[in-house]
Image (spheres, grey):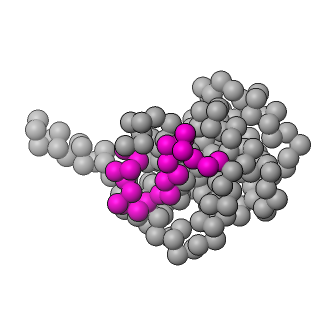
Amino acid sequence: MTGVQTCALPIYLLEKIIRSFKIHKHNFHVDIVITKFYKNTKKIIELVKNDNRFTVIQNQNNLIPLMQRAKLGIFTFGVTAYESFYCGLVSMTISHSKENDRAAKKMLPHHCMHYLGYYENVDFMNIVKIASTLSNDHKLMNELSANGKNLVDGGGVRRVALVIRRIV
């Protein structure tokens, strides 16, 4: 398993995911993407130092090019999940609030992501196994990717502009 990307995760969730990957001997590489406003960069770097299976990518403003290169994303449900749908990046999502949990559950019929659940109920020690199983199921990966792309096609701005033109 290679090409796992994590981003947009609160520190308390990112630490659990990193620890889960660190204890496994699977062949993987995780890019930990940190946006410029993330406050716990030093702590994350300390957690993964001396382990070449992890790369910390700092000060990112645009996640899209990184998502287009990754094989699998792990992040909280929200805007980042929708960005991953647009890119066709298969995602494993976690909710960090009850509101996001409800919203993520509404997305399940669209079959465009693997929803791990509300963070208090997630078995973080099982994340590597889930990621490995998912990334090795090429048919499912292709389905989730295609469904995400169909859901978020990038044409929303154009459609909104057309509606505004009709109104004005």
167 horizontally vs 159: left or right: left
The correct choice, above or below, for 7 with respect to 132 in the image is above
- Residue most extreme to the bottom: 139
The correct choice, above or below, for 12 with respect to 21 in the image is above
Rendering coords of residue 72 (x, y %):
60, 57
Question: Is residue 31 among the parts visible in the rendering?
Answer: no
Quarter of the rendering occupied by the C terminus: top left
Rendering coords of residue 71 (x, y %):
62, 60
48 horizontally vs 87: left or right: right
Rendering coords of residue 127 (x, y %):
64, 54
Q: Is residue 44 magenta?
A: no
Depth order, front residue of 153/2: 2
Rendered residue at 41%/47% (across/down): 104
- Residue most extreme to the left: 167
Picture quadrant of residue 37: top right
- Report the number of numbered marks: 0
Q: Which residues are magenta?
A: 103-124
Rendered residue at 74%/51% (across/down): 21
Rendered residue at 80%/36% (across/down): 47
Quarter of the rendering occupied by the N terminus: bottom right
Question: Is residue 82 among the parts visible in the rendering?
Answer: yes
Depth order, front residue of 164/29: 29
Rendering coords of residue 151 (x, y %):
36, 57
Q: Is residue 113 magenta?
A: yes
